[in-house]
Image (tube, helix red, strand yellow):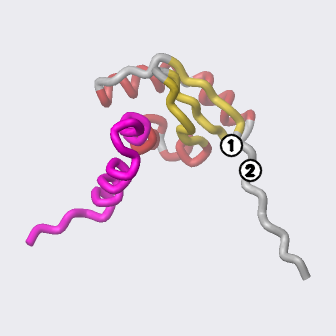
Amino acid sequence: MAFTPISKQSENLLYSIGGEHYQRFIHIYLAWKNVVGDLLSSRSHPMKLEGEVLYVAVQNNTWMQELILLKKDILKKYKLMYQEEIAELVFLISSPKRKCKKHK
């Protein structure tokens, strides 16, 4: 019996849960690290896809500026790697997750 890697199983699960409507966004979300690299992918992530516009959540202004400077390269690299085109990237600062305070 051949085993399927857990990462492939989780990808298949995401695609089946997301359905046909979210298939392209899931593909872009999973490809993000390959396109922008480890450092930038740890500071940002795709948030939503509206038509051909990808909205990307970014940790803070510094990383947003870095991504803005690399925007053309990111779009070109994605198209080269996946033979798909994203027309535009919009970067948004994401608010940090708040920690819940414990009540005494």
Along the horizontal axis of the image, is 2 left or right of 24? left
- Disc 1 marks a residue whose amino acid type is Gln
Disc 1 element: loop
- Disc 2 marks a residue whose amino acid type is Pro
Estimate the x, y position of residue 52 in percent, counting from the top left.
46, 21
Front residue of 44 and 11: 11
Extreme residue toward the left, this view = 1
Which mark, residue 59? 1
Where's the N terminus, which quadrant?
Answer: bottom left
Residue, x 38% and y 34% (percent of image)?
24
Which range is magenta?
A: 1-27
Q: CA distance from mark 2 to mark 1?
A: 8 Å
**Image quadrant of residue 78?**
top left
Front residue of 27 and 51: 51
Estimate the x, y position of residue 99 in percent, counting from the top left.
78, 64
Residue, x 34% and y 53% (percent of image)?
11
Tag in front: 2 or 1:
2
Residue, x 41% and y 44% (percent of image)?
30
Crowding at mark 1 (Cα within 10 Å: few <14, some 14-19, many 20+): some
